[in-house]
Image (tube, helix red, strand yellow):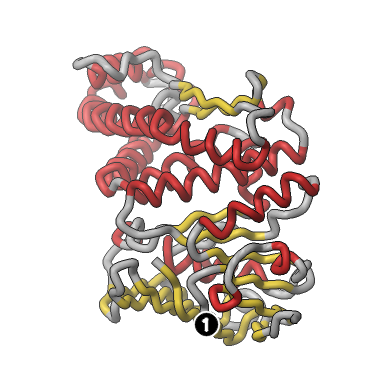
Amino acid sequence: MILTHLRIQNIRNHWQSELECPPGIILLWGENGAGKTTVLEAVSLLCTTRSFVTTADRTLLRRGEESMRADGVFHSDSGVRHTVGVQVAMRKKIELDNAPLEAAADLIGRFPVVTLSPQHRAITAGGPAERRSFMDFVVSQVSRQYLLDLIEYRRILRHRNALLSDHGHRVHALRAQLEAWDTTLSECAVRITRRRRAFVVEYDPYFRRAMSDVVEDRELPAFRYVQSAVVDMDAGDAAEQFRAALGHALERDAHRGVTSVGPHRDDLEITLNGMDVRAHASQGQHKTLLIALKAGEWFFLNDHLDERPMFLLDDVFSELDDTRLRRILAVIPRLGQTFITTANHAILDALPGLPDERALYRVSDGGVHAHAEAA
């Protein structure tokens, strides 16, 4: 899958920007605040219906404007042309091939994308929610059933938490009301947890291989899925076990007004040479891990989908020593169509690849301008 044409209207500091995109590397360079990241956000909107920087759509609006829009022309690997439009005004409207989509979920996975930006540092350095989001986003692109289970689980969880909050400490009154909710929640929870655990196993060799590409075998990463509920997910009665775990936690949950066990409280532990990366990794190691995670994500999606994913790299080359930088730059041309933002356009000279498969754009004051490559 490649994006051949992109148009941005009233998104952040872009009034109206357009660019043609070759199938290889698109380098966007300019000073901080020029609007480079916004171009990648627009691509993300077209592929996932949301920005990778914020979940609040209206914060993307150009100052003084009431609506914004991103439009793109995609060509699938089989040569089929698609158009996508995402508009945000009073509400969000999504169009695929000039027909409206009823739900954002209908777009997920159609135009696969991998994104790496400074915001993603929380995957290795932050709390469990960031790592759960990482897993959920990858798996949702390859499994629509997983995405539907996730949506249903979150819907039921909101209802359950509302009941917990409304009833305060009245545990006995809660049990009967929660019975039906807990049955469905448990079934969803087991399917989600099983798929996440399978993903961790499937994804591990991709991550290790990508890490080796960057630092050879000096730093060995590992994953471990950590459940909040003591449930044997391989057992035939896993849903019953999960429902029992909810019951055991009910008195505590009623006092707190939230559900304390389930996939929404699980974690993905990441270690490097046996040490938890949150406490022991350096800045450079965090950056290397993230790049390896995302490169591994690209190869994972490429093997599990019919379309080659696009790659969005937002200001990722700082805090890397020269050796790691060279090795990472050598990997990028293998990653399909790749959008890169940087304050240093000389990066293009270090990237292998044919000139007709790459483009250099200067971004300034919310405008995108074609820039001829140096001879």
Quadrant the C terminus occupies: bottom right
Q: Amino acid at mark 1?
A: Glu
366 up-or-down from 129: above or below: below
Which percent across, then down, holds residue 212?
A: 60, 36
**Image label count:** 1
29 up-or-down from 329: above or below: below
In this view of the protein, can residue 172 be seen by the observer?
no
As rendered, which of 26 and 57 lies closer to the eye? 26
In this view of the protein, can residue 293 be seen by the observer?
yes
As drawn, is 355 to the left or to the right of 113?
A: right
Read off the residue under disc 1.
20
Quadrant the N terminus occupies: bottom left
Which percent across, then down, holds residue 68?
A: 51, 79
Classify residue 49 by image quadrant. bottom left
Classify residue 329 by image quadrant. bottom right
Taking the spot 73% from the left edge, 54% from the top edge, the residue there is 317
